[in-house]
Image: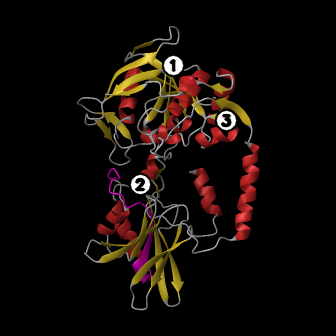
Amino acid sequence: MEQMFNITEALDAPVVCANFKNVQTNTYPYPAYHIVRYGEVDVAYIGFTTTTSGTVTSLSDEQGNPLYSFMREGFYENAQYFIDEARRNGADYVIALSHLGDSEKTGGHPNSTSLIAHTTGLDAVIDGHDHHVIEKQIVNNKDGKPVLLTSSGTNFQYIGQLTIKTDGTIHSSLTDIVNGEVSADNKAQDFINCLKEDIGSQGNFVIGNSEVDLMIYNADGTRIVRKQESNLGDFCADALRVFTDADIALINGGGIRTNINRGNILFNDLYNVMPFGDMITTGIITGQQLLDVLEFSVSSLPAESGSFMQVSGLRFYVNPSIPSPVVKDSETSLFSYVGEGNRRVSNVEVLDKESGKYKEIELSHQYIMATLDYLILEQGASGIFNQVKPISTYWGADIEILRHYLEDSLGGYVGVEYSEPQGRIIFK
């Protein structure tokens, strides 16, 4: 949050968000809307941020006291209040700048179409978050009146434009930049190229070699690391466990970002695999807590999830045909508990460091787990480790631990033992 405030303060533009609130002071850090005059027409731009933001960033202080809320409960009533206020303050048109997404699979979080359907007074919604290309979609509001929804996709492929006609109607269009309808700014592109060359050269040196392709994608481009074991996931999790001498290690699949191809491994290759700069942290987890964590990890199957765990020092069976018994908090979608009923995960075994053999998990035993500070300290991946007690919060940066494992533990060489996933997560 501190970094977000630093960045938004430096922006040479108004920042608007109607659903971000300081719960301790009952105030809004940013104005809900900003009114711009075009000739004799006043347009209010009102901001909305996905309430899932509360699952990927810490909204509490170190003692667990809530500091901020994205207001999932009462979202529509709050939105209506500020839409009406903008109208009372002279807005002829109200346009939402939203990062909500239009997907229906939101786990109960508001999206752009539900925002329109539950309110009145919006004229258009410029959406983001789902990366969809929507030139023009009409959605009826609470009173049955049409509201324009548009989204320009991702990676600056399109530039979107809204036009308010003299008859009061609003039209949208998208201009394709990638396919050459707009030429690049050569000066800006040269500046970017120089930056990329300078930064890239700093990590462009060999630190090892791999006999195999370490993969998070199938050959057809399908991402596997978020829904099944991958050999690169095994490599990364092993690095954490071995470096910290923990019993087990878990890494969320969403934190492992790209493949490493066979051949020379550059420092930049490791950086591209784990580019977020997380610190490695160890904590104490009981056998029962571990069972619950694994159950949440597979709760989204067969769909992919960034919370799907790649593991080391563990092996277990998964049956995704069983309905998931996991219960999530209705306000934040954070992991709450595993309910009654059959579990998807079974036959969990933990690697015994002395014998080198797997043994049945002991529910009351306390295991040392290595993972990312994002997961333990910041409660990322939907709070999956909210019951884990940290014991050492600084083992070093993730990329340095990967490098140490490659250079020191493997002698700079990834061999055929990593040619395939090692049978730690077995589907039945």
Q: In the image, what residue occupies the spot 67% across and 33% down?
A: 400
Real-space Cα separation, disc 2 to disc 3, in angstroms: 39 Å
Q: Which residue is mark 2?
A: 51
Q: Which residue is mark 1?
A: 247
Quadrant of residue 172 within the rendered picture = bottom left
Whether 103 is among the magenta residues is yes
**First in residue order: circle 2 vs circle 3:** 2
Query: Pointers 1 and 3 in contact (CB under 8 A)?
Result: no
Q: Secondary structure at mark 1?
A: loop
**First in residue order: circle 1 vs circle 3:** 1
Q: Secondary structure at mark 2?
A: helix
Query: Pointers 1 and 2 in contact (CB under 8 A)?
Result: no
The answer to whether 82 is drawn above or below residue 365 in the figure is: below
Range of residues picked out in magenta: 87-108
Residue 385 in view here: no
> What's under tag 2, amino acid-wise?
Thr
**Circle 3 Cα neighbour tier, 10 Å, few/some/many (<14 / 14–19 / ≥20):** many
The image shows residue 282 at horizontal and vertical percentages of 55, 27
Front one among 224 and 101: 224
Real-space Cα separation, disc 1 to disc 2, in angstroms: 35 Å
Front one among 39 and 27: 39
Please give left or right for residue 13 compared with residue 233 in the image.
right
Which numbered marker is on residue 265?
A: 3
The image shows residue 329 at horizontal and vertical percentages of 34, 43
Q: In the image, what residue occupies the spot 61% across and 52% down?
A: 3
> What's under tag 3, amino acid-wise?
Ile
The quadrant of the rendering that contains the C terminus is top left
